[in-house]
Amino acid sequence: MSEEPSKVLPFIEHLVELRKRLIIIVVAVIIGMGFAWNLADEILVFMEKPLTGTTYLDTAKQQGYLYLKENYPAIYGRANLEKELNKPKKQHALNYTAPLEPFFIQCKISVIAGFVLVLPIVFHQIWAFIAPGLTRKERKLVVPFITVATIAFCIGAMFFLTTIWPFIINFSLSYETEGLRSWLSLSAYVDFCLRLILLFGLIAELPVITLLLARFGIVSYQFLAPKRKYALLASSIVAAFHSDLVTMFVIMIPLYLMYEVSVWVALLFGKKKVSQTVEPEAA
């Protein structure tokens, strides 16, 4: 006997259920914010690393200069790379102009960090909201969903902080000259970083959502594969909301790559169609 989905709740009951789940999520984030409050300074230091420390881009640049110096000394000397190789790294400090600006920045960092800390609760509430429409067998996927979704979000956020964020900041600082100095605002710097942390975390959730939809038979490889051009267009539109061209590309490329990953996830883990063979009638 096939399992039937639970009875669909009336529209008003859906709204009441949604409000309940949102209240639980908000309370959980507030509690997580309390735990993350004392970590805000350390998180800000990590966000400032492209300004104050050595990133993988600085290391790669130094290794590239040394390689040219050893193997192509003529090019190295003609390009005057000795000056670049021995140039000391400048220290850049964030600046604020409003009296309570650092306090509000600490609040923002604590909220996002608290949200990340309670991600399992957030995903559990999302699952609990959609669970009435699932079969008993599908509801058993709650633990794998929460685990994989939480890990995926954290991977996306850390990938941004360790790979994309240093690239953006190094590109911005490359325009400094003797007559042009950066005067980075604390609020603008942190707001930009936090917004992209959330965005890259959500981008990393795309294969997880596709995996669920494919397992439930809602989407398939045959459905997703022909729509790559629309996915590329959608990725460009999402990236276009950011003002500078560099940030647009570093958002558009990972977003489209996650769609490609989702296509193959649907192929490998999607619900398999049972082929029915028709037996020939006996003569």
Image (cartoon, helix red, strand yellow):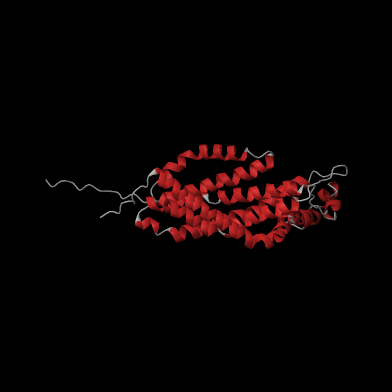
Residue positioned 18% across, 46% down in the render: 280
Q: Residue at x 45, y 46 (%)?
A: 15
Which of the pair 265/197 is nearer the observer?
Answer: 197
Where is residue 116 shown, x and y percent of the image?
59, 57
Q: How many tags in the picture? A: 0
- Specify the quadrant that holds the N terminus: bottom left
Extreme-left residue of the structure: 283
* Percent x, y of residue 134: 37, 52
Q: What is the x, y in percent for residue 283?
A: 11, 45
Residue 57 visible within the image: no
* Of residues 218 and 187, the one drawn nearer to the viewer in this rendering: 187
Taking depth in this image into account, of 208 and 224 the one nearest to the observer is: 208
Q: Residue at x 65, y 40 (%)?
A: 242
Instruction: Report whether 189 appears left or right of 137.
Output: right
Q: Which residue corresponds to the image point at 36% horizontal and 51% vertical from the top-left?
A: 272
Residue with the most extreme right position: 178
Q: Position of residue 251 (x, y in %)?
A: 62, 44
- 111 lies left or right of 263: right
